Amino acid sequence: MEAIYKHPASLVDVQSKYCPGCGHGVIHRLVAEAIDELGVQDKAIFLNPVGCAIWADLYFDMDTVQVAHGRTPAGATGVKRMRPDHLVVCYQGDGDLAAIGTAEIVHAANRGEKFTVVFVNNAIYGMTGGQMAPTTLVGQVATTAPHGRDPDVAGMGYPIRVCEMLATLAGTKYLARGSVDTAANVRKTKQYIKKAFQAQMRGEGFTMVEVLSPCPTNWQMSPVQAVDWLKDKMIPYYGLGEIKDELSFSAGDAAKVGGVA
Amino acid sequence: MSEDKRLMKGNEAIGEAAIRAGCDAYFGYPITPQNELTAYMALHMLDEGRVFIQAEAEVSAMSMVFGAASAGGRAMTSSSSPGVSLKQEGISYASGADVPCVIVNVQRAGPGLGGISPAQGDYFQATRGGGHGDYYNIVLAPKGVQEAADLTYEAFDLAEKWRTPVIVLADGLIGQMMEGVVLPEAKPAGRPDRPWAAGDRAKRSKGGSVAPANHISSLILDPPVLEASIRTRFERYGRIEKECCRFESVNVDKADLVFVAYGTSSRVCLGAIQQARKEGLELGLMRPITLWPFPSAEIARLAEAGKRFLAVEMSMGQMVQDVRLAVAGASGAGVGAKVDFYGRCGGVIPSEEEVLAEARRILGKR
């Protein structure tokens, strides 16, 4: 009989500390499945960021390196340059990547560092308890934007579209934005992640997959409300799809390798 | 195969010694007075097929070092005082994750942007950890170009042996001046096994069973577990203090007054000792080569032998506190041994004459 479902080998079989309805668990699974399918678990190095995903080294059965807040792409640069034949996954949240680590992500992308960033955008600081992130939507309430993000009067600026910003840099070869709000989007997101990993193993340049992800706890919603909010508010602002694709192979080719569902 | 002596700038000798020590990756950022080192690494690391990156920032450069060293490479960065302040974040993380690496600080005058002239104002920062949390780093203080090369070469081995960042604390004078240097032999190519490092998990796996994953991290949220981990690290520090302490003594047995000075200021003291001898005055020098661990036992021994001290620094008095702590730990005749201080700061280097005059004044000789 053919197994149609099994626990990914690259994920440790433990209960995670993530909140009910959090997107990290699904995204971890997609990363693990892609790594399993490419057969590179023992050649993968995962950089777990400061933020909720700091615990990723408990969940991924692979070597990990934990760097200072926001410096994840700098750490990944050092790792990948030392281990060019390894799959290096730089997993970051919106605070790590788009606030304290803005310089690191921009310059790693511009250098065309040959690792893959998985950028989890949930429009809020999770671990520290719901502060405003660079990707917090206008009007969205946060503990540090108690009346909602106000770009003008309170001078809180505008939500940053990271993929579009990085797309202007010649070092970036593949930038995609997915979401985990529906089964269809989960499947698409996995294709993006797997394609980015394949590109990395082929040495094609900087690759990043941004994933819109619900944070019911800090959005102060039920998991179902959070998914609806993501669909109604986040997706219209952060458009889904492959923002930039300058890879030497096509999505169709990528899907054939390893049998993406 | 030994080599002939060649004339080199301190900054370049440090770079060449690092390359010969097997430095796999160098990450830097421009800052005076250490730019020749970064330029040297750019030219020679790339030619050797090794990693060189001019980072976007000092903080990034240090985190690149952290990443490269975590993945088993011999990694290094260099900077000067304001830049080294920025690196403190990564140095603390590397200390907390037991990641070996080498940081060169070609000191200039501070605080703030300060100036670009030589100074020794970063002693506290280097020897007291410097970043947040409970930790120490091995700190090596060269007095010239030859020692800058030798200590840089050795720093990589010390870092790996003790699983800690090692700081080479030079200053703008040592970085900028040219002296004759015999460079150490290049280490053979190829990376030794670092079974703790991230990567090459397949090679760690033996007999059909998959090796456990390696996690390089400084995070431990459970207070008793973190405490135990810090205590274990401090036991290692205790062994470093016993095994790694290094100093040079000049004329201390005959001396009526012993200078305590490191790096550039120790050279000034050597000149003062020679001048003093012409006037029949016996002065000595106790020169710490490791600033952490500090050679406290030797200071205590000299105090117990009835010596008094004059600490000479290019600062308002930082190392002198360690001299006083060492004297406080002395017993018998050493109790209450006198410790005086003479310092210049802001990039001013004390002259032999003014140091000698201070020695004469202390000894009541005019």
Image (tube, rainbow, N blue to C red):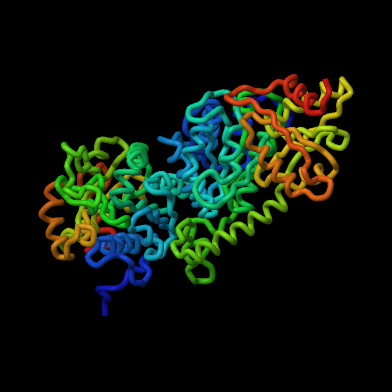
Query: Which quadrant of the rendered structure holds the N terminus of chain A?
Result: bottom left
The foreground one among B163 and B315 is: B315
Quarter of the figure with the C terminus of chain A: bottom left
- Between A25 and A89, the residue placed more toward the observer is A25
State whether residue B253 is above or below residue A20. above
Residue at left offset 57%, top offset 24%? B346
Residue drawn at 45 percent across, 65 percent down: B222
Quarter of the image holding residue B358? top right
Is residue B49 left or right of A129 when viewed as pictured?
right
Image quarter for residue B36? top right
Can residue A253 be spotted in the picture? Answer: no
Q: Is residue B224 above or below residue B16?
A: below
Give x and y (percent) for residue B44. 55, 32
**Could you tell me residue B121's position as x and y percent?**
59, 33
Query: Residue at coordinates 69% horizontally, 28% vertically from top-left?
Result: B342
Number of numbered discs on residues: 0
Rendered view: B308 above or below B163: above
The one nearer the camera, A236 or A12, is A236
